[in-house]
């Protein structure tokens, strides 16, 4: 069997009929090919023809030098099930530090996983287990993961860590993290642990799509607080939608995120914070040329980072709360973030402030942005009941209403003891976010009946283009246009400093703050020092 470098799995005993448990034969094949590679140093390929291959009750331990290649998504499908042991997670392939002693000196080398599907819908564990993944490999060298479709896993779909000289391309992850409440480890579409190879991990994630997953669409997570955040990682041309977070940097250094779309995620489109295992946020990253649109709460949420971080040339629009929100989570790094750059972004049509600085920063640069038409959540408190009110799985309609377009963007609507978040609205209809990623309804206890009473709260009175509610030291603000050109203006002020904020020794030059609904500026705390010049109002 080991004379050929390529082996046909059906010829070697796999049934592929969706009924026979193929896992024992599959494990023997992987072991045989791995042993052969170890003996002569020549990697092997296990080719799997079209079929449904049942992997039942036991994960397959992977071997170095063994590649798995199918005939395409929907053709070659690995079906994961664990009816015989609800305490055992069943990833298709695993090799980990904790279970198998994986490490830099005991790694998987020269492996390719390509052109197949993983169906994880049949795995349910007694308690949430982060190992209940589709793929769960650690310490991979010269790996390639290409054209994979992973869906409905109990934990993370593609959950591989410490990927050196590796490319992850064309992976579609849908509805993964079924058993994750949203607050537990894992539960992502594509989750990659980092830091195990040292200062540099050369990894590219490209052309991947991640939708409806329990936590992140795509995230990078430093696995040990004692490790140095690694550089060398790129995420390009990816799409994340209807996840809790779209793309998250939880511990990289110099992450590059380019030409990606982050749409309709529930917490934030792009997140930097201390939520990862190590409690360390990313730093030194660059996000450029991305569309971050229609996320239920915030477009960009950045905190727990020492900085620097740069956002250049992005569209950050129609998010339910803030376009960009600087804030820190308790328990993480709360020092002032240095050298945060917002440059040439189009930040518009967000529910409240376009940019809100809610945590201390120093030496930040806000340059050449168009911060326009924000504060769309402008409608007052309303409520009604009876005729004309009806709900569907993802909407509420009041035929007698006359709401301003998106005037309730990001609000929480209460209906008969239930609540949902508004993603947009027309004159008579509220569009609602699913109650969790991947869900088909906004309602936790069924759709409210026709005529049910509902209530929407009032909008905040002040909604600025740039709002400062923390200490800002030595900022540079130059060449921005911060205004509102809608027929009915909703962005009340160009710049606001709240009573909790400060703006010290700033250089504020050549900004256009004209055309807001009320005034160019509102300073509840006066700025001090620095230079202000040529700011049109």
Image: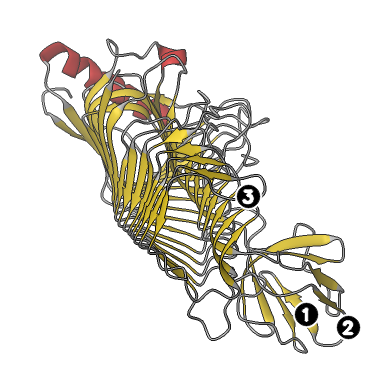
The mark nearer the N terminus, 3 or 1, is 1
Which is nearer the N-term, disc 3 or disc 2?
A: 2
Count of marks overlaid on the render: 3
* Residue 461 spot, x, y in % from top left: 70, 66
Gap in angstroms between the C-alphas marked 3 and 1: 46 Å
What residue appears at the point 58 percent right and 54 percent down from the top-left corner?
266
Q: Are marks 3 and 1 in contact (CB under 8 Å)?
A: no
Residue 305 position within the rendered picture, expressed as x and y whole percent measured from the top left: 46, 32
Please tell me how crowded label 2 is: few (under 14), some (14-19), or many (20+) other residues with Cα within 10 Å.
few
Q: Is 278 on the left or on the right of 43, as rendered?
A: right
The CA span between labels 3 and 2 is: 46 Å
Badge 2 marks a residue whose secondary structure is loop
Visible residue check, residue 48: no
Say which of 444 and 15 sits in front: 444
Q: What residue is shown at x 66% (from left), y 64% (from top)?
A: 462
**Number of the front mark, 3 or 1:** 3
Q: Which mark is residue 525?
A: 3
In the picture, measured across the screen, residue 312 lies left or right of residue 153, that is left
Closer to the eye: label 3 or 2: 3
Residue 272 at x, y percent in the picture: 47, 39
Q: Is residue 185 above or below residue 347?
A: above
- How far apart are the alpha carbons under marks 1 and 2? 9 Å
Q: Which residue is drawn at the image coordinates 81% and 61% (left, top)?
A: 418
Measured as percent of width and height from the top left, residue 512 is found at: 41, 68
Mark carried by residue 386: 2
Element type at mark 1: strand
Image-quadrant location for residue 535? bottom left
Q: Which residue is mark 1?
A: 390
């Amino acid at each position: 069997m080991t004379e050929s470098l390529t082996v046909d799995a059906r010829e070697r005993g796999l049934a592929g009929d969706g009924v026979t448990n193929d896992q024992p034969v599959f494990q023997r094949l992987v072991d045989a090919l791995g042993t052969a590679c170890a003996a002569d140093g020549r990697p092997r390929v296990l080719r799997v023809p079209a079929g449904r291959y049942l992997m039942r009750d036991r994960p397959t331990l992977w071997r170095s030098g063994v590649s798995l290649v199918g005939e395409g998504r929907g053709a070659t499908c690995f079906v994961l099930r664990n009816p015989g042991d609800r305490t055992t997670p069943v990833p298709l392939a695993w090799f980990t530090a904790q279970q198998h002693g994986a490490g830099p000196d005991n790694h998987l080398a020269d492996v390719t996983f390509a052109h197949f599907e993983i169906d994880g819908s049949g795995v349910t564990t007694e308690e949430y287990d982060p190992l209940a993944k589709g793929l769960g490999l650690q310490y991979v060298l010269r790996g390639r993961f290409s054209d994979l479709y992973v869906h409905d896993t109990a934990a993370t779909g593609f959950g591989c860590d410490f990927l050196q000289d590796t490319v992850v391309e064309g992976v579609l992850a849908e509805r993964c993290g079924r058993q994750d409440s949203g607050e537990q480890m894992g539960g992502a579409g594509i989750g990659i642990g980092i830091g195990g190879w040292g200062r540099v991990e050369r990894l590219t994630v490209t052309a991947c799509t991640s939708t409806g997953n329990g936590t992140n669409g795509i995230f990078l997570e430093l696995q040990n607080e004692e490790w140095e955040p690694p550089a060398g990682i790129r995420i390009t041309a990816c799409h994340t939608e209807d996840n809790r977070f779209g793309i998250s940097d939880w511990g990289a250094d110099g992450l590059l995120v380019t030409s990606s779309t982050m749409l309709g995620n529930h917490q934030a489109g792009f997140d930097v914070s201390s939520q990862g295992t190590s409690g360390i946020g990313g730093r030194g990253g660059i996000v450029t040329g991305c569309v971050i649109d229609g996320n239920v709460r915030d477009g960009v949420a950045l905190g727990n980072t020492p900085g620097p971080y740069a956002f250049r040339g992005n569209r950050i629009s129609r998010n339910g709360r803030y376009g960009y929100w600087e804030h820190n989570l308790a328990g993480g790094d709360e020092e002032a973030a240095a050298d945060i750059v917002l440059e040439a972004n189009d930040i518009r049509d967000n529910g409240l402030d376009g940019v809100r600085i809610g945590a201390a920063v120093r030496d930040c640069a806000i340059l050449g942005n168009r911060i326009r038409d924000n504060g769309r959540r402008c409608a007052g408190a309303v409520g009604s009941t009876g005729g004309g009110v009806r709900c569907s799985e993802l909407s509420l309609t009041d035929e007698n209403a006359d709401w301003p377009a998106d005037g309730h963007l990001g609000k929480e609507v209460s209906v008969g003891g239930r609540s949902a978040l508004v993603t947009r609205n027309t004159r008579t209809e509220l569009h609602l976010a699913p109650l969790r990623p991947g869900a088909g309804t906004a309602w936790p206890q069924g759709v409210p009946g026709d005529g049910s009473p509902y209530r929407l709260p009032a909008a905040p009175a002040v909604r600025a283009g740039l709002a400062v509610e923390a200490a800002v030291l030595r900022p540079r603000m130059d060449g921005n246009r911060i205004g509102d050109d809608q027929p009915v203006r909703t962005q009340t002020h160009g710049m606001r400093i709240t009573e909790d904020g400060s703006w010290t020794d700033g250089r504020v030059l050549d900004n256009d703050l004209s055309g807001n609904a009320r005034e160019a500026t509102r300073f509840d705390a006066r700025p001090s020092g620095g230079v202000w010049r040529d700011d049109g109002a």
